[in-house]
Amino acid sequence: MNHDGADAPVARVRRRDARIIVLQVLVISLIGTLFLRVAWMQLGDSAQYRTAGTSNSVREVIVPAQRGLILDQAGRPMVANRSGLSVTVDRAELARQGDDGKAVLTELANKLGTTYAALVDRMKPCGTPGAPKQPLCWNGPRERPVIVAEDVPQEVGLQLMEAEGAFRAVRTELTPTRSYPKPYGINFAHLAGYLGPMTSEEVAELDEEDQVALANSSVGRSGLEQSYNDVLSGRPGVQQVSVSRSGKVTETLRDEAAQAGDNLVTSVDAKLQALVERQLFEALVRGRDQGKPSDSGTIIVSEVETGRILAMASAPTYDPQVWVGGIKESEYNTLTDPEKGNPLLNRATQGTYAPASTFKVVSTAAAIKAGYSPTNKYACPAMYDVGGQLFRNYESRAYGSIDFAKALSVSCDTVYYKLANEMWLKDGGLNPSGTPAEAMYNMALAFGLGKKTGIDVPGESAGRVVGREQKKAEYEERREDFCKRAADGYPEVKPKDRADLLQAYAKDFCAEGDKYRAGDALNFSIGQGDTVVTPLQVNSMYAAIANGGELLAPTVAKAAVTREGEVRQEYAPRSLGRLDASDSTLSFLRQALADTSVTGTASGAFRGFPLAQIPVASKTGTGEVVGKVSTSWFSSFAPATKPKYAVTCMVSQGGTGAGTCGPSVRAIYEALFGVSGATVNPSKSVFVDGKPNAELPTVTSDGIGKPGQGIQPVAPSVTTPPPAGGEAPVPGGLPPAEVPRGFVNSPSPSSSSRSSR
């Protein structure tokens, strides 16, 4: 019997059962593997996944700190705060979107008036390909939202807030922003300074905790903002919040409040500052009305007994608001462009110029110390001959036989030429033996020239005074360049006559630049040649003569004060030492300089001023610069009999000191002492009670200060305060300089014979 037909179904059943068994085993194995993996994740890797889950749901929010205010000596806010809108983008949230957030960023760029590419670049960390240069790139941690726009217009911020659902990953929040109330219309840009983001190098120096809180903070980059950044900045707060998958905050886990910065009370008086800015404007216009370029300038007012700065103006200047919200590269280039006058440069502390006849107080003190009697008579011819080279008096005028007081008063160059030549010969001339006395050079150092004054704002220049050893050192350093220029000339310099003068100087320097010649000594004696100073150095020098010989470091800050009114720290005046001149010499200089305002070169500027009641000690200067119009100088202090204030004015390419600066200096003294015509009325002084506040001011919520009652809190957000006492604001803001092409801030080397007055 054939069983094949019956066995076939059985075989099929057996094969089917085998497949089912294999499938069952496979399913059971997979289930077992999955179970074991889940168990391992729950037990073995639980800590790792709990950490990851927490990291994804907890975020840190940085709460910016209110920056301290910068106040004048009466408590008026000169730099304050206001609320501004900032826009941030969360890169992690963008990455979760299907198109990596391109649609959101494109629409955001349209709202902000920029481009998609610019926003993408803005979010790249500093140093990565395509990222903008500092300070426009991002320095913050990768997990933090990136600030892509600051100080956003209110209507744009509201649109973003209202359309939050369409702008996932984008947040708009209020942040403190610097504001400039401009009491009395002041500019105050150079002393105030500005803020900028931290650099990647600065961020790298912070510890891990500070990097989270401070990485994208703004810090002071110049002026008081930089010098007192630690006082003003405060400390940002940190909030840890739990965030749902939809981006909503569900819980606050930690809330560390921000700590506001302290307020900085300064010695500057806003009302006087406005007047000084206006008088600098007038001096520049006055020079231009005389046909001079008057491309830049500065005026400084200080207390002679303390060194405190009461006002300081520099021109050309700029609107400090340009830094708020981040400066554009084109704007920064304008601020630093020499052809536009380099508005960022503070002429008072950073500009260097030949001091001209303001230097003659140094030469006089040196001559008296060297044994020359101030009461003897000295010849003042129209010119002085040294080895066949004629060194001329200003405008070749002769005054006969005169003493030192008259020589200072009428600014006779030839008296100082003869003194300098005799001292140079006594030192050994071209080939000295032993150690030369170099009386004038060493006296210049003792008067604080050639080194920084120590003012409490950064970026100060030291100027330059050159003696015999410095001449040799400079020659070795610069010989190669000058010898090359001697051969090739200055083809890039226009006009040609200026280029020819520079080439002639280069030839002379290349041949014998290491020799300290008679011409060097003569030029040195009248503040010309290689000598350059800052206007602040000159003002400090005259203040030291006024106060009896104490050279003081100029200071702007008076105290750091908390928002609650506690005086955190007072900044006392600092002495830099005494002048190397006797009391009798300083007394003589004070009297001689007072004569200058009566019968000397400053008499025209002070004609009709009540000098009998308020004698003004002054010295004019007209510094010659090769290929340019003379520098106008006027340095002074008053009252000469009991000095209180020093005032120095300098206008580059402004002509004579008396003609350009003199009237402005007079107007400032009229405001300081309450002078109207020939009448002196202290109640009309620019200061309340006729003098600066001796005590720290009380500051009320409207930003107006009252002296002598201790500090009170100031409202954190301040708009422009009304002038105290209902007085009309003084116009502020300086004119743009009409700067010629090729303008250079420091003067070019002078030729061997210069006149100065």
Image (cartoon, rainbow, N blue to C red):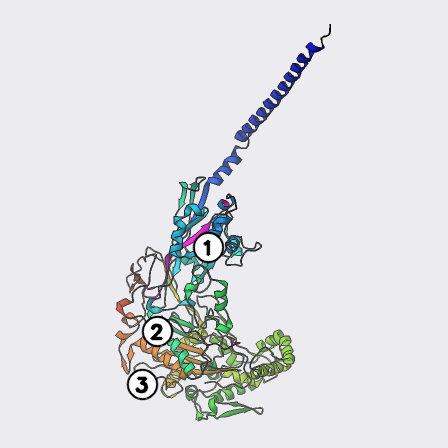
Closer to the eye: label 3 or 1: 1
The answer to whether residue 9 is visible is yes
For disc 3, the marked residue is 608
In magenta segment, residue 83: yes
Q: Position of residue 140 (x, y in %)?
A: 50, 51
Q: Nearer the viewer, residue 559 or 394?
A: 394
Could you tell me the amino acid type at mark 3? Gly
Question: Going 40% across and 44% down the picture, which residue do you hit?
Answer: 255
Q: Secondary structure at mark 3?
A: loop
Q: Extreme right residue here?
A: 1
Circle number at residue 166 = none
For disc 1, the marked residue is 110
* Quarter occupied by residue 501: bottom right
Mark sitting earlier along the chain (3/1): 1
Q: Nearer the viewer, residue 687 or 132?
A: 132
Mark sitting earlier along the chain (2/1): 1
Q: Secondary structure at mark 1?
A: helix
Closer to the eye: label 2 or 1: 1
For disc 2, the marked residue is 275
State the quadrant of the C terminus.
bottom left
Q: Position of residue 646 (x, y in %)?
A: 38, 76
The boundaries of the magenta stretch are: 68-92
In magenta segment, residue 685: no
Mark 2–mark 1 contact, CB under 8 Å?
no
Q: Spatial distance from mark 2 to mark 3, Cα to Cα?
A: 21 Å
